[in-house]
Amino acid sequence: MTAPTIEPSRVDTGSSTDPALRVDGLWKIFGNRSERIIGTPDADLSRKDLQEKTGCVMAVKDVSFEVAPGEVFVVMGLSGSGKSTLVRMLTRLIEPTAGTVHLGKEEITNADERALRDLRRKRVGMVFQHFGLLPHRQVLDNIAFGLEVRGEDRTERRDRAQEMVDLVGLSGYERSYPDQLSGGMQQRVGLARALAADPDVLLFDEPFSALDPLIRRDMQNEVIRLHHEVGKTMVFITHDLAEALKLGDRILIMRDGEVVQVGRPDEVVGAPADDYVRDFVSDVPKSHVLTLKWVMRPLNGDEAVEGPALQADLIVREAARAVLDNRGPCRVVDGDTVVGVVDDEDILRVVVAEEHSS
């Protein structure tokens, strides 16, 4: 697995700020009278058994989570896990069978058609795997399209579109048509179009899965850069663990429509919830993900530690040089509080374990 080249900012998801997005008890069951299944023993059947018994398909089962303002929240799972159905329910492109979705303080699941249309136009931006660009429109007009639908003045929307062109690195291509652009450049247009409306939340549904690996890596780095610059709340759907670990402040892992685990990348790798997640993360270079809090040991009361102080949330590989260059243990701190100690043996233990597992 290739190590991330840029680290995303990690937000404080434990703050008292109201969530940007809140999902409570969300279900999607496809089939006739599907709503009657919820709350019955049939809801606990496997997907196969439920379909054989009722003809219904369980896509998403009782999913709940919150996304903090400015957070990059990644939903990850294999094909058929329910992740794409989930992200489409957030704006009711697919209607939930049960449950609620709140964007800020506004409940999306009970919004009428007019309110829902307004929300999609102004408060939520979406970026899909298939770019959906208008082939007969130049880059600038594709980016401005959403603003045009909103009825904004032509000069204002073109000025805004030009700002987005510059932001995503497409300066000089304003007059190009989609078929004159590479896949990565087309996806930049899609990203710029979503950003142009200045939405509260950006939803990404596997936007880079059709791109070549090198272009995909560049686009991941672009998302990280844009997140640093504009600070948007992002919900990112992917089947790729490396992508999830690289982008996510937190990761939600799905299997068969259910939530298996939610946590920061280091929590998912360091403390997998079950064998399913453990198998997923078995090939991850742990020094690239785990933080010092996972490898530190307690500080003995009489132990003298004169080495540099390193923050507990520092990734092991980033701390390795400071620890290995120091002739003795280093303090691990949380703010100004010493919470443990780490030395070269603690660092090398992680690296050696990686080599043996590769």
Image: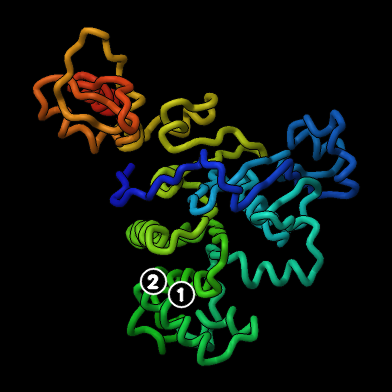
Q: Is residue 108 visible?
A: yes
What quarter of the picture does the N terminus occupy?
top left
Asked if 177 appears above or below 279 in the picture, the reply is: below
Q: Is residue 212 visible?
A: no
Give the crowd class for mark 1: few <14, some 14-19, many >=20 residues within 10 Å: many
- Which comes sooner in the sequence, label 1 or label 2? 2
Name the outermost residue toward the front.
336
Q: Relative to 120, is 13 on the left or the right?
A: left
Residue 226 placement: quadrant: bottom left
**Which picture quadrant has residue 345?**
top left
Judged from this view, the residue extending furthest toward the top is: 302
Say which of 191 and 59 sits in front. Answer: 191
Q: Secondary structure at mark 2?
A: loop
Amino acid type at mark 1: Val
Give the Cα separation between the discs numbered 1 and 2. Answer: 8 Å
- Local secondary structure at mark 1: helix
Looking at the rendered structure, the kind of residue marked 2 is Val
Q: Nearer the viewer, residue 305 or 264?
A: 305
Q: Is residue 43 left or right of residue 231?
A: right
Label 1–label 2 contact, CB within 8 A: yes
According to the image, label 1 marks what residue? 189
Residue at the spot 47% in from the left edge and 81% down from the top edge: 160
Percent position of residue 44, x then y: 78, 30
Residue under label 2, please give it: 168
Q: Residue at x 42, y 49 (%)?
A: 247
In-image side of 276 versus 288 (left or right): right
Indicate which disc residue 90 carries: none
| Residue 55 spot, x, y in % from top left | 84, 43
Tell me which residue sits at (74%, 37%) in the image.
47
Structure colour scheme: rainbow
